[in-house]
Amino acid sequence: MRQAVLAAAVDLLSTEGLSGATVAAVARAAGVHETSVYRRWGSRENLILDALTSRLNTALPIPDTGHVREDLVRFFTALARLLDTAQGRALLRLSVERDDTIEDRRGPYWSERLDRAAAMVQRGIERGELAADANPGLLVEAVSGPLFTRVLLSDAPVGPAQVERLVDLTLNGARPRQGS
């Protein structure tokens, strides 16, 4: 039942958007009773968050090419592709909406992925590609923030060229300084 409901929710989000993914519509599409959905997830927001995180967990693999720039470009290009989908936009918008029923679940979704991304930066520090005092979390935020902003505020797409420019701009501030 769980997989059928989650798949129906993702399908509805893709075709109908966030507003079309009601509990009733998801239950109908999955062939289950609406009360079963409420019993398991408690709210529409929890259902949508679970559906999106379950479906999109594999969308953001953490590359390990041996080069911090290449790892970051690959990761953030995947993130940009994700944010260019109905599911990705819905997840991002849902994650910034204030709602006590999902407060404890949405924060960990993004923080876990961004913490995993910070591991790429840490590897770059350990290899000497970045300054020893570079802040992995801040570097990841410096690249992801503009991506999130474009999606949330301007609804503008983010292509691979913009991702590379953001990564380069950020890495230039984190590289070891000559004579330091």
Image (cartoon, rainbow, N blue to C red):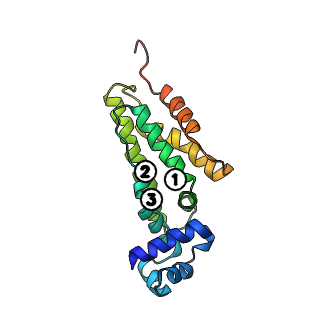
- The residue pinned by badge 1 equals 82
- Specify which label sits upstream in the sequence, 3 or 1: 3
Q: Residue furthest left?
A: 126
Q: Tag 3, which secondary structure?
A: helix
Give how far across and how far down residue 32 sits, in percent.
46, 85
* Residue at numbered disc 3: 56
**Amino acid type of the residue tagged 3 in the rendering:** Leu
Q: 113 or 70, which is in the foreground? A: 70
Q: Quadrant of the C terminus?
A: top left
* Mark 1 / mark 2, whichever is N-terminal: 2
- Res 18 visible: no
147 with respect to 110 (left or right): right
Circles 3 and 2: CB atoms closer than 8 Å: yes
Q: CA distance from mark 1 to mark 2?
A: 8 Å
Quick check: 116 left or right of 32?
left
Real-space Cα separation, disc 3 to disc 1, in angstroms: 8 Å
Q: Is there CB contact under 8 Å for labels 1 and 2? A: yes
Instruction: Using the image as rendered, state which of residue 97 and residue 116 is in the foreground.
Output: 116
Q: Position of residue 31 (x, y in %)?
A: 47, 84
Please report the residue visible at 57 percent of the width from the left and 63 percent of the height from the top: 98
At x 55%, y 44%, the residue is: 145
In the image, residue 79 above or below residue 125 = below
Q: Tell me whether circle 3 and circle 1 mark residues in contact (CB < 8 Å).
A: yes
Please tell me how crowded label 2 is: few (under 14), some (14-19), or many (20+) other residues with Cα within 10 Å: some
Q: Which mark is residue 60?
A: 2
Find residue 159 and report its image quarter: top right
Q: Residue at x 47, y 61 (%)?
A: 106
> Dot 2: what SS?
loop
Q: CA distance from mark 3 to mark 2?
A: 8 Å
Point 61% across, 51% down: residue: 151
Residue 85 x, y percent position in the rendering: 56, 57
Could you say where residue 109 lies in the image, as x and y percent from the top left? 43, 57
